[in-house]
Image: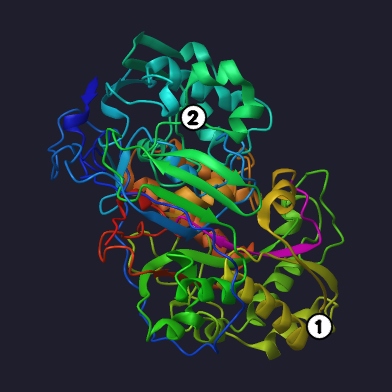
Amino acid sequence: MKLRSRHLAPFLVLGVLLLLLACARAAPTPTPTKAPPTATPTTAPVVAPAATPTPTRAVTVAPTATPTRVLPTATPTTRPGPKGVLNVIDGLGTELWLLRPSTGEAPLWLIGEPLVTFDYDIDAPTKNGILQGWEIKVNPDGSRDWTLNIRKGVKFHKGWGEMTADDIKFSLIEFRKPASVNANTNQLITWYGNDPNNMTVKDPYTLVIHETTIQPITEVFRIISEEESRTFRPYSKKYMEQVGEDKFQREPVYAGPYEWAAQQRGYSVKLKAVPDHFRLTPGFAEINYYKVLEDATRLAMLRTGQIDMAAIPGSFAGELKNTDVKIVVSPNSNEPFITFGGLFPDRPGCDPNVPWVGGCKGSDMLSERPLKVRRAFTMATDRPAIVEKIQFGYGSVGALSFSFISDKFPWWKSDWKPLPYDPKQAKQLMTEVGYPNCFEFNFWIQPENPTVRDIGEAVASMLESNLGCKIKRRVGEYRPVLRNMLVERNTAGWMYNFAGGPIARPYRYACLHGGPTYEVITHTELPFFTELCVKARDQADLAAFMKIEQEIGDNINKYFPTIPISLNHQLFGVSPKVKEGSWVPKPRGGGLHRLEYAQPK
């Protein structure tokens, strides 16, 4: 059975394939100096949680689907060339640019080009990226053959030639190497069965991938789209083979609308626009990323014009009211939660003496005693106060972690409700399991996201005051230490704050990081994740697939692997240098995504 891209409709057919318009922009450089913290935060206006588009899932059913709305394929525009400099603050972690060990370096959004773009209104791929089309053939044995048609004229940076099928195949094979801790690694290598022989280069612009272990089609498209800065972006095989990984890490060559130009490690990264990029003409000639963690410093730099775009906490929204800096809100951009570390059954790093763990078998961790501890910690956390006083109303109290979001989505169940704030009942539960004055443990507080950092400190303080816990705090960035602890399943005795995202749907988050034992980075491995995620992965019927997602939600609601704090609306300060309306943040995702579309005023 052959399913061509023009016949694929979102969900009830083998692939959701719609075309999304593309246009673009990018940025320049002054070297800002960090201004001292200024101004007293004032309360920002409350924004009600906005409903995000209902995602759907592509399902193999029949080759004769009626296509839904089809947008014309984007073509490069004839706008004026890039000009000016855009200075931004966004995620800089390891500041190394090889994709397979990356966990989210923000500049990779711009220097790398995805195979497909995405229409987030319908949760479906579009043909504005490297692929101009595709065909998916379902074989009699249930395997699938993906024929990828590569757009001609996609050029690598710095004169390294045109992208071909060989470059894409090479870039996919690279994920088989050790230390590939990119969270999408398992899905990428599963796509071709972890066997390079399952990828055939038919000609320079055609690659055929034989998929033996079937994955949900929309999820395959998602990991080759622009959804995250760490999703798949091919690079030059010739350049990598000539210079090696060490030089590539410092001076990468991809095919995005901006190319790497220079960096001062720990401080800044400079990108330059690619004026003749096939997808669009970027707006700014140069974009500079700066690494600034302090909230007040970010605010001061926005107010003085040293920085043009940056995420800000809700507490600072009022500070910008009477300035020329605009506030742009990205609804439901992340979901802060607090993780109970060490919930990894049968792993060497398990510590059975941690009260919320209870033993090193899965059944131990799901038993009544550790469950009461996890419930007590959740009930001792005043989440409505966090939303009101830390998020300043830009969000809502969370019921479940891992992308279940809210009752506006079709997978939601009415009996999923947040536990009430009840410190008296929490204290009683702790007394019942022998911890009337709590116990001592470690708490890792990540500072990268200012709101999430404050949430971490607030939760630690509430557990101390309401339960008598003795907490040793450590303030530290996610990369590399905490990330390595998660990769190695070595978080016993720790709690830590986290901001989950992007929020797509439960399968995407719960079965990537929730999570199952076969993924690279997970917050827990409670047994139901692996069992149900495998069932969901192999399910082609949408209704049955959603029912499995609900089963995952029922288990999360029952066993509390995390304290689900809230849904958080991310605020961005945007300077008047940026033409109003030219930059719109990605739905359901934090970070300065799509900066190539930002245009100078």
Q: Position of residue 107 (x, y in %)?
A: 49, 46
Residue under pointer 2: 253
Q: Is 52 above or below relative to 14?
A: below
The answer to whether residue 78 is left or right of residue 504 is left
Residue located 66% across and 80% down the image: 458
Q: Residue at x 21, y 25 (%)?
A: 4
What is the quadrant of residue 69 in the picture? top left
Q: Earlier in the sequence, mark 1 or mark 2?
A: 2
Is 434 covered by the magenta stretch?
no
Judged from this view, the residue extending furthest toward the top is: 202
Across and down, in percent, residue 111 comes to 44, 39
Given the image, on which type of amino acid does mark 1 rest? Thr
Percent coordinates x, y for residue 119 in the rendering: 27, 48
Residue count near mark 2 (Cα–Cα under 10 Å), binned few <14, some 14–19, many ≥20: many
The label number, if any, that marks residue 431 in the structure image: 1
Q: Residue at x 50, y 18 (%)?
A: 237
Look at the picture and state if 448 lies above or below 362: below
Mark 2 residue type? Val
Q: Residue at x 44, y 70 (%)?
A: 305
Q: Quadrant of the C terminus?
A: bottom left
Q: Vertically, is 142 above or below 340? A: above
Q: Is residue 503 visible?
A: no
Residue 490 magenta-highlighted: yes
Q: Which residues are magenta?
A: 489-503
Total numbered labels: 2
- Work out whether residue 75 or residue 266 is closer to the camera in this orientation and state it: 266
Label 1, residues with CA under 10 Å away: few <14, some 14-19, many ≥20 = some
Quadrant for residue 257, please give it. top left
Expressed as whole percent of the image width and height from the top left, the position of residue 301 reads 51, 71
